[in-house]
Amino acid sequence: MIEMNVIENVIPCTDVVKLTPRIGAEIRNIKLSADLPEQTIAAINELLLEYKVIFFRDQGHLNDTEQERFSIRFGNASPYPEGTRPIFEIDSVGDLPTDIWHIDWSCMDAYPKISVLRGVVIPSIGGDTVWSNTAAAYRDLPPTLQRLADELWAVHSYPGSSNKIYTEDFTRPRIETEHPVVRVHPETGERTLVLGSYVAGFLGIPRYDSHKLCELFDSHIAAPENTVRWKWKQGDVAIWDNRATMHRATKDYGDQRRIVGRATIQGEVPVSVDGRQSIARFKFMEPRPG
Ligand SMILES: [Fe+2]
């Protein structure tokens, strides 16, 4: 389905192909670059807010430097715990597992608002990424569970103390933040769920009950009607609103190599439905006391 769209007013012949009713659109006939006019960048941001994740094929002209230059048109580059590399390379050889639902760096207080991911080495088959619209997942909850979510706060931790992907490692810098489970999106005003693999537990809820509650919300996040799945080709670029989505990779490509490069743009400290801000317990690169 091709729709009339904001970007057509800026760049003629650019098409927006909606991929599912609730999330995702492919934007065709546009060459991404740092030199795009301001109104084009603003139009791309509008599309991002509407579709949550947008895809661009055939951007093989971008290298790490050009990807970074384009990405910072949307804001300041986000700091990385690993160092100051502009592009964070996610390599199937030896990297952290990414095949669990997560929000990029949600252990930080002002976690990234936008991620820009480029397919560098893509397996011939497999390695898709799936995104979920966390505003839709929230809207799908029955009102009683929405009210429960509105009140809940979760601890997001790296390295995690959770039963999920990370193991405790006291030699590494610790980053930990208390986030509301529901944040109000600073640009759209939508309520979105803030959960995923960095969650160590809910404040005031014992571990066992926290785990069950996570499963409950996860089932709405993973519901097929809230998700879109992208089959990568080399040179593809995906841009997502990290405040309104969660995502996961798919590890189904055996020992084929897969490398994607990601730039992230610094976000705002989340605000709960009752106007309270997330609280950083341990910040970027601060050593853990004790
Ligand atoms: Fe990610």
Image (cartoon, helix red, strand yellow):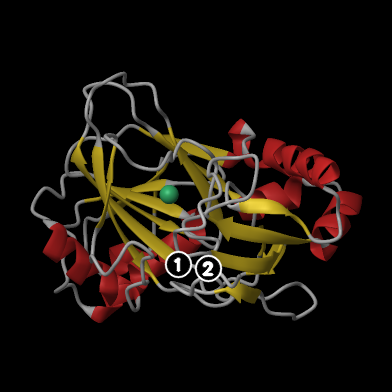
Establish if 44 lies above or below 268: above
Q: Residue at x 75, y 46 (%)?
A: 140
Residue 270 visible in this rendered orientation of the protein: no
**Residue 17 or residue 132, whichever sits in front:** 132
* Tag shown at residue 174: none
Residue 173: image location, x then y, percent: 46, 65
Residue type at numbered disc 2: Met
Disc 2 to disc 1, how far (Cα)? 8 Å
Residue 24: image location, x then y, percent: 45, 46
**Residue 111 or residue 46, whichever sits in front:** 111
Q: Residue at x 43, y 61 (%)?
A: 48
* Tag shown at residue 108: 2
Graded by Cα atoms within 10 Å as few (under 14), some (14 to 19) or many (20 or more), the crowding at tag 2 reads: many
| Residue with the most extreme left position | 61
Residue 216: image location, x then y, percent: 77, 39
SS at circle 2: loop
Q: Is residue 224 left or right of residue 203?
A: left
> Quadrant of the image for the C terminus?
bottom right
Task: Give the tally of numbered discs.
Answer: 2
**Residue 4 or residue 260, whichever sits in front:** 260
Q: Quadrant of residue 181?
A: bottom right
SS at circle 1: loop
Residue that mark 1 sits on? 112
Graded by Cα atoms within 10 Å as few (under 14), some (14 to 19) or many (20 or more), the crowding at tag 1 reads: many
| Marks 2 & 1, CB-CB < 8 Å contact | yes
Q: Is residue 182 left or right of residue 241?
A: right
> Quadrant of the image for the N terminus?
top left
Establish if 287 lies above or below 105: below
Q: Quadrant of residue 109?
A: bottom right
